Image: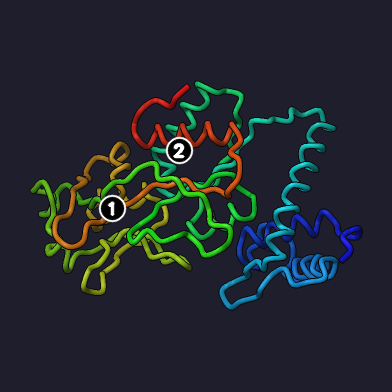
Amino acid sequence: MDFTTVSLVALRVFREVADRGTLTAAATALGYTQSAVSRQVAALERAAGTVLLQRRHDGVRLTEAGRVVLRRAGVVLDEIDATARELAGLPVSSGAVRLGWYTSAGAVLVPRALAALRRDHPGIAVTTREGSTPALVRAVRAGSVDLALLASAPPFRPFDAESPPLVVRTIAERGLCLAVPAAHPLARGDYVDVADLRGQRWVSSPPTAGEKPLGVWPGLDERPEIGHTARDWLAKLHLVAAGCGLTTVPASLAPVVPPGVRLLPVRGGSPEQRRVVLARLPGPLPEPVARLADALHAAALGSPAPG
């Protein structure tokens, strides 16, 4: 085992692979060829004297040794980046926090929390990234984000089986709603019966590896007719307003629902509750991260963040 010859490039590539989940995705993010990424990982494994990544059909998975190298690599790279900023005469902020968030959180929850944090704690600099749940969980494991805002659906299983388990904090729990065109027959009442959802046309997100498409009411006993697919929640809601179909949305999106759309609860069938959770690696929580977590919690509850 000899790490004296390990380059910073190899460490950065390794962290990117752990974050993205595949060699191909890491190569795309870094602007490298896949063979170049493979060579850097192989060089790091030779230095470690052991396998760091398990290659599988659905991507890569860190071995126990890989998790150790990733943890140490993160510390080294963060220190190198801070040194470069200091030498360049740029401020080295001790209040920097990196946040990952699930798609619909960017419509209301994240902006509300960041506005409150900027008002009460202007010295904390937050950078954010949107992503799917599997991608954000990998980013937490890779140390690319300090905190991940995730949506969880029943039966509320752990987000992954890696060790150590992530520290998870529930900050809100709400029901799933149905977005209906205002002129649709289902919009006439104060709720929709689940039996009336048979044969409806849906606006849904495209399927993503490791996640179910969002937009179709869960548990329908038929193959749904999906007329339109869109990743962006606002686009889906505007398609609903145009009469193109129905979609599901978390109740938290009520403040940004466009004209021409009614949000209604659905009765019958299994309750469709959704949890909003914060996930992070175990260990002491730095104050800036704790401040952001409190701001997100307060925003989810619709109350001011504590000072």
Query: In the image shown, does 165 or 78 lie closer to the viewer?
Result: 165
The residue depicted at 55 percent of the width and 46 percent of the height is: 129
Across and down, in percent, residue 96 comes to 64, 34
Place of residue 54 in the rendered image (x, y in percent of width and height, measured from the top left)? 66, 73
Could you classify mark 2 by the number of other residues whose Cα lies within 10 Å: few (under 14), some (14-19), or many (20 or more)? many
Quarter of the picture holding the N terminus: bottom right
Question: What type is the residue that disc 1 sits on?
Answer: Gln
Total count of labels: 2
Identify whether 163 is placed above or below 120: below
Q: Residue at x 70, y 54 (%)?
A: 71
Q: Amino acid at mark 2?
A: Val
Q: Position of residue 273 (x, y in %)?
A: 28, 53
* Mark 2 / mark 1, whichever is N-terminal: 2
Q: How dense is the environment of label 1, judged by Cα within 10 Å: few (below 14), some, or many (20 and up)? A: some
Q: Which residue is mark 1?
A: 273
> Residue at horizontal 44%, vertical 36%?
296
Q: Quadrant of residue 9?
A: bottom right
Q: Which residue is mark 2?
A: 110
Q: Nearer the viewer, residue 145 or 28?
A: 145
| Furthest-bottom residue in this view | 57
